[in-house]
Amino acid sequence: MGSGKYSALSGAVAREQAIGNIAANLANISTTGFKKNRISFAAILRGANQTTDARGMNYSRIRTIATDFTQGGMQPTGRSLDVALDGEGFFKVQKGQETYYTRSGRFMLDENGFLKTGDGANVLGAGNDPLQLDTTLGKDVLIAETGDVSINGVAAGIQIGVFNVEDTGQLTKVGDSLYRLKEGGDQPVANARILQGNLETSNINMMEEMTAMIATQRAFEANSKALQSFSKLSEKQDELGSVG
Protein backbone atom coordinates (compact mmCIF):
# COMPACT_ATOMS: atom_id res chain seq x y z
CA MET A 1 0.00 0.00 0.00
CA GLY A 2 2.86 2.34 0.79
CA SER A 3 4.18 2.21 -2.77
CA GLY A 4 0.73 3.04 -4.13
CA LYS A 5 0.46 6.00 -1.78
CA TYR A 6 3.82 7.36 -2.90
CA SER A 7 2.87 6.79 -6.53
CA ALA A 8 -0.26 8.92 -6.08
CA LEU A 9 1.76 11.55 -4.21
CA SER A 10 4.39 11.81 -6.95
CA GLY A 11 1.62 12.07 -9.56
CA ALA A 12 -0.10 14.87 -7.64
CA VAL A 13 3.15 16.82 -7.19
CA ALA A 14 4.04 16.49 -10.89
CA ARG A 15 0.56 17.65 -11.97
CA GLU A 16 0.70 20.57 -9.55
CA GLN A 17 3.95 21.70 -11.19
CA ALA A 18 2.36 21.27 -14.62
CA ILE A 19 -0.59 23.45 -13.58
CA GLY A 20 1.85 26.17 -12.53
CA ASN A 21 3.58 25.97 -15.91
CA ILE A 22 0.29 26.25 -17.83
CA ALA A 23 -0.75 29.20 -15.67
CA ALA A 24 2.54 30.95 -16.48
CA ASN A 25 1.93 30.37 -20.20
CA LEU A 26 -1.58 31.80 -20.00
CA ALA A 27 -0.37 34.82 -18.02
CA ASN A 28 1.96 35.70 -20.91
CA ILE A 29 -0.46 35.19 -23.78
CA SER A 30 -0.25 38.94 -24.60
CA THR A 31 3.51 39.28 -24.02
CA THR A 32 5.36 40.25 -27.19
CA GLY A 33 7.71 37.53 -28.41
CA PHE A 34 6.94 35.20 -25.49
CA LYS A 35 7.61 31.49 -26.06
CA LYS A 36 5.64 28.91 -24.13
CA ASN A 37 7.12 26.16 -22.00
CA ARG A 38 6.38 22.49 -22.65
CA ILE A 39 6.44 19.83 -19.94
CA SER A 40 7.21 16.14 -20.46
CA PHE A 41 6.71 13.46 -17.83
CA ALA A 42 8.79 10.37 -17.03
CA ALA A 43 8.71 7.45 -14.64
CA ILE A 44 11.24 7.55 -11.82
CA LEU A 45 11.54 3.76 -11.80
CA ARG A 46 11.60 1.76 -15.00
CA GLY A 47 12.04 -1.80 -16.18
CA ALA A 48 13.22 -4.28 -13.56
CA ASN A 49 13.43 -1.61 -10.88
CA GLN A 50 9.77 -0.74 -11.33
CA THR A 51 8.79 -4.41 -11.01
CA THR A 52 10.90 -5.16 -7.93
CA ASP A 53 11.57 -1.96 -5.99
CA ALA A 54 8.29 -0.21 -6.83
CA ARG A 55 6.09 -3.34 -6.92
CA GLY A 56 4.78 -2.34 -10.33
CA MET A 57 3.89 1.20 -9.28
CA ASN A 58 4.79 4.11 -11.55
CA TYR A 59 6.43 6.97 -9.68
CA SER A 60 6.00 9.88 -12.09
CA ARG A 61 7.95 13.09 -12.27
CA ILE A 62 8.51 16.00 -14.63
CA ARG A 63 11.34 15.01 -16.95
CA THR A 64 11.91 18.32 -18.73
CA ILE A 65 10.48 21.82 -18.96
CA ALA A 66 11.58 23.06 -22.39
CA THR A 67 10.85 26.27 -24.27
CA ASP A 68 8.91 25.92 -27.51
CA PHE A 69 10.50 28.35 -29.98
CA THR A 70 7.92 27.98 -32.76
CA GLN A 71 6.94 31.15 -34.61
CA GLY A 72 4.27 33.40 -33.15
CA GLY A 73 1.82 35.47 -35.15
CA MET A 74 2.36 38.94 -36.63
CA GLN A 75 0.64 41.96 -35.11
CA PRO A 76 0.79 45.11 -37.26
CA THR A 77 1.46 48.26 -35.23
CA GLY A 78 2.50 50.81 -37.86
CA ARG A 79 5.23 52.04 -35.52
CA SER A 80 8.57 52.47 -37.29
CA LEU A 81 10.69 51.08 -34.44
CA ASP A 82 8.56 47.97 -33.96
CA VAL A 83 10.09 45.02 -35.81
CA ALA A 84 9.32 41.31 -35.95
CA LEU A 85 11.34 38.35 -37.10
CA ASP A 86 9.67 36.21 -39.75
CA GLY A 87 11.59 32.97 -39.46
CA GLU A 88 14.46 31.75 -37.33
CA GLY A 89 16.84 33.75 -35.19
CA PHE A 90 16.92 36.22 -32.32
CA PHE A 91 17.69 39.86 -31.80
CA LYS A 92 20.75 40.31 -29.61
CA VAL A 93 20.81 42.94 -26.86
CA GLN A 94 23.27 44.05 -24.21
CA LYS A 95 22.48 45.30 -20.74
CA GLY A 96 25.49 46.25 -18.67
CA GLN A 97 28.02 43.47 -19.21
CA GLU A 98 25.35 40.85 -19.94
CA THR A 99 24.24 39.74 -23.40
CA TYR A 100 20.74 38.42 -24.05
CA TYR A 101 18.62 37.13 -26.92
CA THR A 102 15.02 38.02 -27.64
CA ARG A 103 12.23 37.74 -30.19
CA SER A 104 10.60 40.93 -28.94
CA GLY A 105 11.32 43.80 -31.32
CA ARG A 106 9.66 46.70 -29.51
CA PHE A 107 12.53 49.17 -29.78
CA MET A 108 13.03 52.89 -29.15
CA LEU A 109 15.69 55.58 -29.42
CA ASP A 110 17.30 57.24 -26.42
CA GLU A 111 18.43 60.87 -26.32
CA ASN A 112 21.77 59.93 -27.93
CA GLY A 113 20.22 58.01 -30.81
CA PHE A 114 21.03 54.52 -29.47
CA LEU A 115 18.51 51.84 -30.35
CA LYS A 116 17.21 50.35 -27.10
CA THR A 117 14.71 47.86 -25.72
CA GLY A 118 12.00 49.04 -23.36
CA ASP A 119 14.12 48.19 -20.31
CA GLY A 120 17.17 50.07 -21.60
CA ALA A 121 19.26 47.31 -23.18
CA ASN A 122 21.29 48.22 -26.29
CA VAL A 123 20.23 46.52 -29.52
CA LEU A 124 23.28 45.03 -31.24
CA GLY A 125 24.17 45.00 -34.90
CA ALA A 126 25.52 42.17 -37.02
CA GLY A 127 29.01 43.06 -35.75
CA ASN A 128 27.93 42.88 -32.08
CA ASP A 129 28.12 46.64 -31.70
CA PRO A 130 25.44 48.87 -30.13
CA LEU A 131 23.40 50.58 -32.85
CA GLN A 132 23.37 54.38 -32.90
CA LEU A 133 21.34 56.40 -35.40
CA ASP A 134 22.23 59.90 -36.57
CA THR A 135 18.97 61.58 -35.66
CA THR A 136 20.11 64.85 -37.27
CA LEU A 137 19.24 63.23 -40.60
CA GLY A 138 15.57 63.28 -39.67
CA LYS A 139 12.92 61.14 -38.01
CA ASP A 140 11.66 58.98 -40.87
CA VAL A 141 13.29 55.65 -40.01
CA LEU A 142 13.03 52.83 -42.54
CA ILE A 143 14.15 49.32 -41.61
CA ALA A 144 14.53 46.96 -44.55
CA GLU A 145 13.81 43.23 -44.32
CA THR A 146 17.57 42.69 -44.20
CA GLY A 147 17.78 44.86 -41.08
CA ASP A 148 19.54 47.74 -42.88
CA VAL A 149 18.45 51.12 -41.52
CA SER A 150 17.94 54.38 -43.42
CA ILE A 151 16.75 57.77 -42.25
CA ASN A 152 14.80 60.07 -44.56
CA GLY A 153 15.96 57.93 -47.47
CA VAL A 154 19.65 58.12 -46.50
CA ALA A 155 21.44 54.90 -45.56
CA ALA A 156 22.42 55.06 -41.88
CA GLY A 157 25.24 52.53 -42.33
CA ILE A 158 23.94 50.21 -39.63
CA GLN A 159 22.14 46.89 -39.67
CA ILE A 160 20.06 45.25 -36.94
CA GLY A 161 21.67 41.92 -36.15
CA VAL A 162 19.81 38.62 -36.21
CA PHE A 163 21.54 35.61 -34.66
CA ASN A 164 21.07 31.88 -34.31
CA VAL A 165 22.44 30.03 -31.29
CA GLU A 166 24.10 26.65 -31.61
CA ASP A 167 21.68 24.98 -29.21
CA THR A 168 18.39 26.62 -28.18
CA GLY A 169 18.29 24.15 -25.28
CA GLN A 170 21.04 26.27 -23.70
CA LEU A 171 18.79 29.35 -23.58
CA THR A 172 17.21 30.11 -20.21
CA LYS A 173 14.43 32.61 -19.60
CA VAL A 174 15.35 35.64 -17.50
CA GLY A 175 12.10 37.61 -17.87
CA ASP A 176 10.84 40.30 -20.28
CA SER A 177 11.08 37.82 -23.18
CA LEU A 178 14.87 37.75 -22.74
CA TYR A 179 17.08 34.66 -22.79
CA ARG A 180 20.57 34.06 -21.48
CA LEU A 181 22.82 31.60 -23.31
CA LYS A 182 24.40 29.21 -20.78
CA GLU A 183 26.86 27.53 -23.12
CA GLY A 184 27.86 27.69 -26.78
CA GLY A 185 27.99 30.52 -29.25
CA ASP A 186 25.94 32.19 -31.94
CA GLN A 187 26.23 33.13 -35.60
CA PRO A 188 24.49 35.73 -37.77
CA VAL A 189 21.49 34.52 -39.77
CA ALA A 190 22.35 34.86 -43.45
CA ASN A 191 18.85 35.46 -44.83
CA ALA A 192 16.96 36.92 -41.90
CA ARG A 193 13.64 38.60 -42.65
CA ILE A 194 12.71 41.58 -40.48
CA LEU A 195 9.24 43.11 -40.81
CA GLN A 196 9.02 46.76 -39.83
CA GLY A 197 5.82 48.02 -38.22
CA ASN A 198 5.01 44.59 -36.75
CA LEU A 199 5.51 42.73 -33.50
CA GLU A 200 5.59 38.98 -32.99
CA THR A 201 2.85 37.78 -30.67
CA SER A 202 3.31 34.94 -28.19
CA ASN A 203 3.06 31.42 -29.60
CA ILE A 204 0.45 30.42 -27.02
CA ASN A 205 -2.86 28.92 -28.16
CA MET A 206 -5.40 29.76 -25.47
CA MET A 207 -7.74 26.88 -26.29
CA GLU A 208 -4.86 24.40 -26.25
CA GLU A 209 -3.61 25.66 -22.90
CA MET A 210 -7.10 25.70 -21.36
CA THR A 211 -7.69 22.12 -22.52
CA ALA A 212 -4.35 21.09 -20.99
CA MET A 213 -5.26 22.91 -17.78
CA ILE A 214 -8.56 21.03 -17.45
CA ALA A 215 -6.93 17.64 -18.17
CA THR A 216 -4.07 18.30 -15.74
CA GLN A 217 -6.44 19.55 -13.04
CA ARG A 218 -8.48 16.35 -13.36
CA ALA A 219 -5.33 14.22 -13.11
CA PHE A 220 -4.31 16.16 -10.00
CA GLU A 221 -7.73 15.61 -8.43
CA ALA A 222 -7.61 11.88 -9.25
CA ASN A 223 -4.23 11.53 -7.54
CA SER A 224 -5.47 13.57 -4.55
CA LYS A 225 -8.50 11.29 -4.17
CA ALA A 226 -6.23 8.25 -4.35
CA LEU A 227 -4.11 9.74 -1.54
CA GLN A 228 -7.23 10.23 0.57
CA SER A 229 -8.28 6.63 -0.06
CA PHE A 230 -4.86 5.32 0.98
CA SER A 231 -5.02 7.43 4.15
CA LYS A 232 -8.41 5.98 5.06
CA LEU A 233 -7.13 2.44 4.46
CA SER A 234 -4.14 3.14 6.68
CA GLU A 235 -6.47 4.35 9.44
CA LYS A 236 -8.52 1.16 9.15
CA GLN A 237 -5.37 -0.96 9.35
CA ASP A 238 -4.30 0.89 12.48
CA GLU A 239 -7.72 0.25 14.04
CA LEU A 240 -7.54 -3.46 13.21
CA GLY A 241 -4.06 -3.62 14.66
CA SER A 242 -5.28 -2.07 17.91
CA VAL A 243 -8.13 -4.58 18.21
CA GLY A 244 -5.72 -7.51 17.68
Image: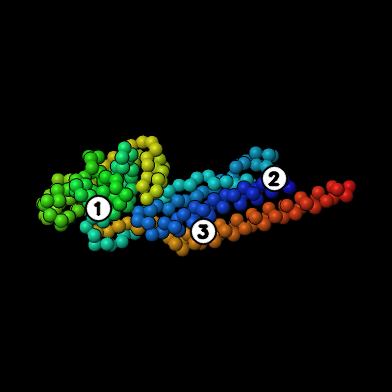
Residue 196 spot, x, y in % from top left: 23, 56
Q: Which of these two is toward me, 44 or 221?
A: 221
Q: CA distance from mark 3 to mark 1?
A: 37 Å
* Mark 1 burial class by Cα count in 10 Å: few <14, some 14-19, many 20+: some
Q: Are marks 2 and 1 in contact (CB under 8 Å)?
A: no
Residue most extreme to the front: 111
Residue underneath mark 1: 108
Lower position in the chain sequence, tag 3 or tag 2: 2
Where in the figure is residue 204, as x and y percent of width and height? Answer: 41, 58
Give neighbour class at mark 3: few <14, some 14-19, many 20+ (Cα, 10 Å).
some
Q: How is the image coloured?
A: rainbow
Q: Is residue 7 left or right of residue 146?
A: right
Task: Identify which residue is drawn at 49% across, 52% down.
Answer: 21
In the rendered image, residue 224, in percent from the top left (x then y), is placed at 65, 55
Q: Is residue 85 visible?
A: no
Residue 73: x and y in percent read 34, 59
Residue 3: mark in rendering: 2
The local secondary structure at tag 1 comes to: strand
Q: Earlier in the sequence, mark 3 or mark 1?
A: 1
